[in-house]
Image: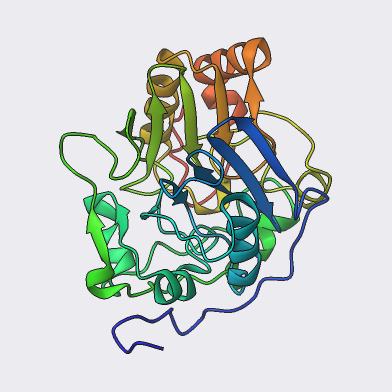
Amino acid sequence: MENDMNYGNDYKFIPASSVASGNGLELLPDLFCQTIQIVNFCMVGEPKSEEFVLVDAGMPETAGEIFAAVAERFGEDSRPKAIILTHGHFDHVGAIIELVEEWKVPVYAHSMEMPFLTGQKSYPEPDPTVEGGLVAKMSPMFPNEPINLGNHVKPLPSDHSVPEMPGWRWIHTPGHTPGHVSFFRDKDRALIAGDAFVTVKQESLYSVMMQEKEISGPPRYLTTDWHASWESVRKLEALKPSIAVTGHGLPLSGEELSISLEKLAAEFDKIAIPDFGKYVDENKH
């Protein structure tokens, strides 16, 4: 392994999965979403072309599955132009070092995520007390120490363009993490939301395993700023997306998406914000 990149000391495989694991969905001709265990990553670009990127990088120790998915969609020995991150939590950067070593491609993330991606700073500890179920209670075992991508990671351009993703723009959607971003394409109103909101109750082991579809705020056990999270959901709802891929759960589109996202934006305090937890402002209402 190149000595300028490393995972945190608490990096490990997490034994959690869902019925959707291994499933891939073509949502648009150039937007493909694949589930690995309990998280999604996207491939953006026309199949078999060389102009594509990877958005997010899966769970720990799943590089082989990502390589296989890319080979199947874009051909053997194909490599993306870049890896673009919504944020740096362990389940979105789990395989990134193997991918970068193999592909030799740059990684881009919001400048406020840099400390968590260059070994300088750990995210706040997960909150297992947050109401919501077994995944929340398991969260202390999740890797939390920062990975270090060294000079392989660069900040997203300040003009909101997304490298190697023409037509898309990044939108700062903090709350779940300080530098969380979502990606939006104006021409067809496609949205890659990351964990700004998700479509499964990520705290509930049953919902995660069965992939029960239910619009939800960001995963509760790792969200530290609920006011910013609500603002981010409002910002995304105002874009009136036609289709949304989220970090966890199945994609939503059309009326199902607009109705549920409108409801989430209006009633975020009731739907998303837990009644208790160490990052919950007691004056939430």
Q: Position of residue 41 (x, y in %)?
A: 56, 50
User: In the rendered image of this protein, does residue 233 appear above or below residue 59?
Assistant: above
The number of discs equals 0
Q: Which residue is found at the position 40% from the left and 34% from the top?
A: 183
Q: Nearer the viewer, residue 96 or 15?
A: 96
User: In the rendered image of this protein, does residue 277 appear above or below residue 145?
Assistant: above
Q: Which residue is found at the position 58% from the left and 13% from the top?
A: 258
User: In the rendered image of this protein, does residue 233 appear above or below residue 36?
Assistant: above
Q: Quadrant of the N terminus?
A: bottom left
Q: Position of residue 253 (x, y in %)?
A: 63, 20
Q: Nearer the viewer, residue 228 or 143?
A: 143
Q: Which residue is found at the position 40% from the left and 46% from the top?
A: 51
Q: Position of residue 18 (x, y in %)?
A: 79, 53
Query: Does residue 220 appear left or right of residue 115 in this picture?
Result: right
Q: Which residue is found at the position 56% from the left and 42% from the top?
A: 47
Q: Image quarter for residue 249? A: top right
| Residue that lies at the very extreme toward the left in this rendered image | 158
Q: Is residue 228 visible?
A: yes
Q: How is the image coloured?
A: rainbow
Q: Position of residue 192 (x, y in %)?
A: 48, 35
Q: Is residue 285 visible?
A: no
Query: Does residue 186 appear left or right of residue 19 in this picture?
Result: left
Q: Nearer the viewer, residue 112 or 271?
A: 112
